[in-house]
Structures are given as C-alpha cells and as structure tokens.
C-alpha cells in the first residue's frame, strides 16, 4: 500500500522542484454553419452582414443541434413568457429579463402564457431532458425553452444568451438586431458534477468577488463551486465554537496582507447566490495537513501544546493536526457540524492532500475518523485522492489531482478504489489546474505541474483519463484555481479565461463533440463576450479570437 501522504508535490517553491527534476453532433458544429447560411440568406429577417450566430456555436457544445428555418428576432414587442406557475420559473424569467434589458433597451415584460416571444416552459413530464437538460426551439414566432427542472431551464437560458450577439452582455444600450438562429437544440450534460474550485485561503476574496466568479461559472453551465476554506495561510469561515479560527487564523494571507474571513451570514449569502445560479457550494476544510492557521489559533491542537506563528509563505506539507490527541476530534466534530449546518448541498470536502507531516498510520486513523464525522452530520465525503490510501467509506468521492509525473502506484491505488465503488472527480493538475501558467511568459500562476496551454486543458477525455478506473466511476470534472499568486478578480479571470470554459465543456458536452479544431473556433467566438462582460482574458495565440 502506498504511503498516503507524501506522494504529490504541490505548490512547493518552484526552483526546488525544477532543480530536482460532432457531430453536435459534430456535424452540428461544422454543418451548422452551412445550414445557417440558408437561414441567414432570408433577407426578410436578416439584414446583410448581421446573420445570427450559428445554432450550436456555444460553449459548451450542445448534445444535439438541428438548424432549421428562419431566425427569431427579439424586438421592442418581445415578452418573456413564463408558462408555469412555479415561482422558480418566474425567477428565471426575471433573471433573463435582467440580462437582456440593459443592452437591448427593450422592456421585455415577464408575463404568462402565449404563442410568441421567449417562452420558458417547465414540464415535469418532459423526462427526456434529465435533471439538468433542456430543449430550445427557435423560429420566427418564438424561442421556446422546455425543461423538466428549473436547473434545466436555467442552463437553457445560458444557451440562449450565447446565441445572441456578444454585445448583449454590455450594461449599456447597444445596436440590434437581436436574432436567434432557427432550429432545435436538445441538450443534456454528460456528467452530473461540473465544478470549479476557488482557493480563498492563500488569498482571501470578498463575497462580491466570489459572486462575480459564480456568474461566470453559470454562463458555462457548471453546477458546483468548491470553496477551499482553510489552509496553512488562512482560516476563512466563522466557527462559533472555535472563534479564533477565523478571528486570528484568518487575519493574514500569502505575502502578509490582511486576509479576512466569511461570517456565517456572508457564507449563507454565497450559498444563496450560488443556488440562484444553480450551483451547489462544496465547502472544504483541508485536514489533517494544511492546518497551520488552525494550529496557530489554538495551542491545544498541537502535539507539543505550542501554537506556531501565522504563516504567509507558500510551502506545503509542514503542518498536521495532532492525531493521538482527543481534543483533535472534538475540534473536527465541531467544525464539521457547524459547516454541515451551513451547507444545503450533499457534499463536504475534508481535503486529505499533502499530509507530509502526518505518519501514514496516523493519516489512515485520522481520515477514517473524519469521514465518519461527515457521515454523522448527513453529508457525503469528498477528499483529495490521497483519501484512497485510507479506507474510503461507501459513497465517498475521491478528487484526483495527479499529473503526468504522478507515479504508477498512486494512480493504481486510485483506480483500484474506483473499481471498488469510490466515485471520482477528475482535476488533473497538468490539465485542469487554472493556476498553472499557460507558458513560460505567463506572469501569474505556478508551474510545478508544467505549463497548461488552452489546448492541453481541453484536449483530454475524462472517461478514459485514469487507466483502470471504470468510465462509470467518473462523477465529473473540476477546474481548481489555487491563489498563491492571485489577489483579485482581474487576476482570477486572467488565469481562468479562456481555460475554464474548456473544462466546463468536458463536463457537459458528449464525447462525440470533442474536437479541438471545432472547439477553438467556438471558444474564439467567446472573446467578444468575455470583453463585454469585462473579463480580462488571456488572448492565447492558439485560439482564433473573433473580432470584437
Ligand atoms: C492539491 O493540489 N494539493 C490538491
């Protein structure tokens, strides 16, 4: 058996590390263009040079696209018709109106049933679309979105948004026309778990900054926000029974800045906002390593009873909870109980990575006890993949963050656990870590897993990525963003865009749509949308960016 800790090396000072070392149906995406030009040639509805974006030229690529007929034109007469009594459907209608009114300048009243306009239909009998799928039908009379669930309707709204010109995202009035190509999209996600992680520990991000990121994740149909709430450099969530965790352990960050933490009300607001965008928040308290902020806050948590100083550097692997001490389990129980009470979602993440200062036996003892605590408070445990070196409980999820240099024994251990029923979230560091530099010239970020180009982050298949892990064990994918070098939203966006949409597409789109040459064109078409949204993205030379 592998020593659970000690296998990965992450975020260690780089020099040390280096020193030692379609249909859309693809037919869809290409075929759509041709079919669309037929529609675009319909001069009745399409002024020259302003043909609508081809149906299906979205990120993520839809599962099935059938272009047909003439486009829909959104005008001053358009109503948003919520064809359901559901308050949630109504709220989605209001959200859509809120997106479209500033740029179109049209009133877009949110009203009831009718044959024309933008129609939002919640149809619980429409089982074909699953828990998150939707159908979009567009013709000159209406655009109709149908879904079985509000989440499906919301994802359909994101598609509709992307079918409209990028300037629809501007906050000031823009010139039309506002057309949606004619035809049908039937869409359903490939994976149930489509996540992004934000490290709010190495640098603290305000509630407003987190909300901004949530809105960006929603545009690409992600449904999970994993918040890395504690690490050596900062504890970011108020815990009433151990108040110094936040008030002392949260008071600094990498580089010595003032840090910060979320009050319980702040955190509830993040959860509420995420939920309004159909994202579930997965909170992570990283244990038993990555705990210097906790150890600094309470001397009794240390084996020698002495609290270390707060830490503002970027080394990893030097801290550990004291596994033999009883107080450790009182602490874990209190923290997990309070966190579970703040969490309407199913999952709670207990970290488990890089516990280089915990012996293997202690690691196994600790992780097995911590998993039981999560279960006691009604949550499903997620751990970084080192959890598979302990005894994953039934239903546990392991998050794989290995990379090309991860040893065979470690990969095999994870694959063996997957074969026995542990589900996997895949976030390979040299593919989906958004904090890896794009290339040698990238100013922000790290490079211990190598450089991760836009193509590299997109061009892999989750179903076959980890040798020996059954395709059915893959619950989904995540794009983590570690924040040692990132201090604000601009810097977050510079690293996340344009790679985040690629990982989102791996999570959503069927494997049959996977094609870099087609993807890079769809991604390039997102450039003007990023700009309209104020996202300062990296203009990767490998992507043919559309003119603004
Ligand atoms: C990790 O990057 N240590 C999960």
Image (cartoon, rainbow, N blue to C red):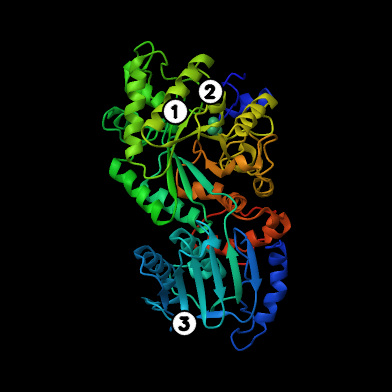
Q: Which percent across, then down, holds residue 421?
A: 58, 34
Q: CA distance from mark 1 to mark 2?
A: 10 Å
Q: Nearer the viewer, residue 207 or 33?
A: 33
Residue at position x 67%, y 28% in the image: 412
Q: Residue furthest top?
A: 304
Element at label 3: loop
Q: Earlier in the sequence, mark 1 or mark 3?
A: 3
Q: Earlier in the sequence, mark 3 or mark 2?
A: 3
Element at label 2: loop
Lateral position of residue 343 relative to residue 510, left or right: left
The residue identified by callout 3 is: 115
Q: Quadrant of the N terminus?
A: top right
Residue at position x 52%, y 75% in the image: 143
Q: Which percent across, then down, holds residue 216?
A: 49, 55
Q: CA distance from mark 3 to mark 2?
A: 58 Å
Residue 401 seen = yes
The residue identified by callout 2 is: 390
The residue identified by callout 1 is: 371
Residue at position x 33%, y 32% in the image: 337
| Disc 1 within 8 angstroms of ligand 1 (CB) | no
424 relative to 310, above or below:
below
């Amino acid at each position: 058996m592998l020593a659970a800790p000690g296998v990965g090396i992450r975020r260690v000072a780089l020099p040390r590390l280096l020193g030692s070392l379609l249909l859309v149906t693809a037919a869809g995406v290409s075929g759509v263009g041709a079919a669309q030009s037929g529609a675009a040639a319909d001069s009745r509805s399409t002024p020259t040079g302003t043909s609508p974006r081809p149906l299906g030229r979205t990120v993520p690529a839809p599962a099935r696209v059938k272009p047909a007929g003439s486009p829909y034109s959104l005008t001053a007469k358009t109503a948003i018709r919520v064809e359901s009594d559901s308050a949630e459907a109504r709220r989605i209608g209001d959200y859509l109106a809120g997106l479209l009114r500033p740029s179109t300048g049209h009133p877009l009243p949110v009203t009831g049933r009718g044959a024309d306009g933008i129609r939002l239909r919640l149809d619980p009998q429409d089982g074909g679309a699953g828990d998150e799928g939707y159908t979009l039908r567009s013709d000159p009379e209406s655009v109709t979105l149908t879904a079985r669930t509000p989440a499906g309707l919301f994802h359909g709204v994101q598609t509709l948004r992307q079918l409209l010109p990028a300037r629809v995202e501007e906050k000031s009035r823009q010139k039309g026309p506002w057309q949606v190509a004619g035809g049908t999209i039937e869409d359903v996600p490939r994976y149930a778990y489509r996540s992004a992680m934000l490290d709010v520990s190495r640098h603290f991000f305000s509630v407003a900054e987190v909300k901004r990121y949530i809105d960006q994740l929603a545009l690409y149909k992600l449904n999970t926000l994993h918040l890395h709430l504690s690490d050596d450099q900062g504890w970011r969530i108020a815990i009433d029974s151990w108040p110094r965790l936040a008030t002392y352990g949260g008071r600094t960050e990498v580089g010595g800045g003032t840090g910060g933490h979320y009050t319980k009300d702040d955190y509830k607001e993040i959860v509420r906002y995420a939920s309004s965008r159909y994202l579930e928040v997965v909170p992570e308290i990283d244990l038993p390593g990555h705990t210097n902020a906790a150890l600094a806050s309470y001397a009794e948590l240390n084996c020698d009873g002495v609290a270390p100083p707060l830490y503002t550097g970027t080394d990893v692997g030097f801290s550990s909870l004291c596994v033999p001490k009883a107080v450790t389990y009182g602490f874990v129980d209190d923290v997990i109980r309070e966190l579970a009470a703040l969490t309407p979602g199913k999952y709670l993440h207990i970290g488990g990575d890089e516990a280089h200062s915990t012996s293997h036996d202690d690691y196994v003892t600790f992780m097995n006890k911590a998993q039981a605590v999560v279960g006691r408070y009604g949550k499903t445990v997620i751990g970084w993949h080192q959890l598979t070196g302990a005894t994953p409980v039934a239903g546990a999820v392991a998050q794989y963050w290995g990379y090309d240099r991860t040893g065979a024994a470690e990969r095999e251990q994870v694959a063996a656990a997957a074969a026995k029923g542990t589900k996997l979230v895949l976030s390979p560091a040299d593919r989906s870590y958004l904090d890896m530099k794009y290339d040698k010239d990238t100013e922000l970020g790290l490079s211990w897993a190598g450089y991760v180009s836009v193509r590299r982050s997109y061009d892999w298949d989750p179903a076959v990525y980890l040798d020996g892990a059954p395709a059915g064990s893959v619950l989904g994918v995540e794009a983590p963003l570690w924040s040692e070098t990132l201090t604000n939203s601009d810097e977050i966006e510079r690293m996340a865009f344009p790679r985040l949409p690629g990982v989102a597409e791996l999570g959503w789109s069927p494997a049959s749509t996977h094609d870099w040459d087609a993807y890079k064109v769809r991604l390039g078409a997102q450039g003007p949308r990023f700009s309209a949204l104020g996202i300062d993205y990296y203009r990767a030379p490998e992507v043919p960016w559309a003119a603004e």
